[in-house]
Amino acid sequence: MRKGIHPENYRIVAFKDMSNDDVFLTKSTADTNETIEVDGVEYPLVKLEISRTSHPYYTGKSKLVDTAGRIDKFKNKYAKFKK
């Protein structure tokens, strides 16, 4: 491998899924200003919107979106134009 092309700041970083508060540790070079304490040790913190613990593809659960109310509202609004 060529020298000098890979980052030197690999360290253990905590990634926190904000949708379910799951925290996992892995090596990363991600820059962050926040920290979190996990098992008595302080790690740099990267906040995530979604991760493998909350993504519907990996969990097998889909998030329910309240579309029934919107569909009923649409049908009622345009029912007068129905022939």
Image (tube, rainbow, N blue to C red):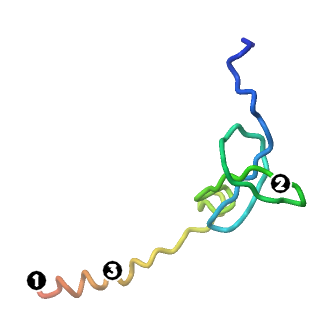
Element marked by disc 2: strand
Which percent across, then down, holds residue 64?
51, 74
Disc with the residue nearer the chain's start (1 vs 3): 3
Circles 1 and 3: CB atoms closer than 8 Å = no
Residue at position x 82%, y 59% in the image: 37
Q: Mark 1 points at which residue?
A: 81
Which of discs 2 and 1 lies nearer the camera? The answer is: 2
Separation (CA) of disc 2 from disc 1: 63 Å
- Mark 2, Cα crowd under 10 Å, few <14 / some 14-19 / many 20+, is few
The numbered dot on residue 48 is none
Of helix, strand and loop, which one carries label 3?
Answer: helix
**Which residue is painted at 80% across and 44% down in the image?**
12
In the rendered image, which residue does mark 3 sit on? Answer: 70
* Contact check, label 2 and label 1, Cβ < 8 Å: no
Residue type of the residue flagged with mark 3: Arg
- Name the one closer to the observer, 74 or 54: 54
